[in-house]
């Protein structure tokens, strides 16, 4: 399951960057997703996928796992701030992260 909660929320990147929708810094190392029937290992509850492996990959840049760009904060319009590295730059790496997750799983 590829989770990207931020794609369904209309917060901008500046607001989202320190919230649960914009960072995984505060995530627990493991998450219990057994409440979702499709992830249940009980054949009576989930007859098709009960014996499959499950990987929960959390990524929250809002690019739906397809982004690969760097975007300067749109509110930082002063060129001298941009040149001096004082503006926040958002690094969207959905594509690279997705490829990394898949490559890791295939090893």
Image (cartoon, helix red, strand yellow):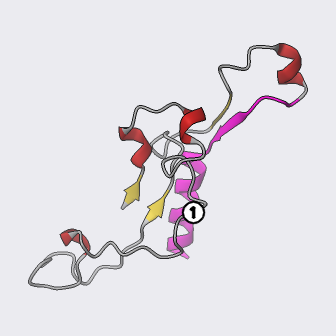
Nearest the eye: 20 or 38: 20
Query: Which residue is pictured at 54% across the width and 43% down the height?
Result: 61
Nearest the eye: 102 or 62: 62
Please determine whether, in this image, residue 64 is positioned above or below residue 25. Answer: above
Please determine whether, in this image, residue 44 is positioned above or below residue 85. Answer: below
The picture places residue 22, in percent across and down from the top left corner, at 54, 46
The picture places residue 91, in percent across and down from the top left corner, at 67, 40
The picture places residue 42, in percent across and down from the top left corner, at 17, 85
Q: Is residue 17 magenta?
A: no
Q: Where on the picture, by quarter, is residue 39? A: bottom left
Please determine whether, in this image, residue 57 is positioned above or below residue 77. Answer: below
Quarter the N terminus occupies: bottom left
Q: Is residue 107 left or right of residue 6?
A: right
Q: Is residue 104 left or right of residue 85?
A: left
Query: Which residue is pictured at 35% across the width and 79% down the height?
Result: 53
Quarter the C terminus occupies: bottom right
In the displayed orientation, state which residue is furthest to the left: 44
Q: Where on the picture, by quarter, is residue 89? A: top right
Nearest the eye: 92 or 76: 76
**SS class of the residue under badge 1?**
loop
The magenta segment is 85-107
The residue beneath circle 1 is 26
Q: Where on the picture, by quarter, is residue 15? A: top right
The picture places residue 47, in percent across and down from the top left corner, at 12, 79
Q: How many marks?
A: 1
């Amino acid at each position: 399951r590829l989770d990207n909660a931020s794609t369904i929320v209309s917060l901008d990147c500046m607001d989202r960057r320190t919230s649960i929708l914009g960072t995984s810094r505060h995530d627990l190392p493991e998450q219990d997703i057994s409440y979702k029937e499709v992830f249940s290992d009980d054949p009576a509850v989930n007859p098709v996928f009960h014996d499959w492996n499950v990987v929960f990959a959390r990524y929250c840049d809002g690019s739906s796992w397809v982004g690969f760009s760097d975007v300067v904060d749109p509110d930082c319009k002063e060129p001298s701030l941009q040149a001096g590295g004082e503006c926040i730059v958002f690094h969207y790496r959905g594509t690279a992260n997705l490829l990394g997750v898949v490559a890791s799983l295939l090893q």
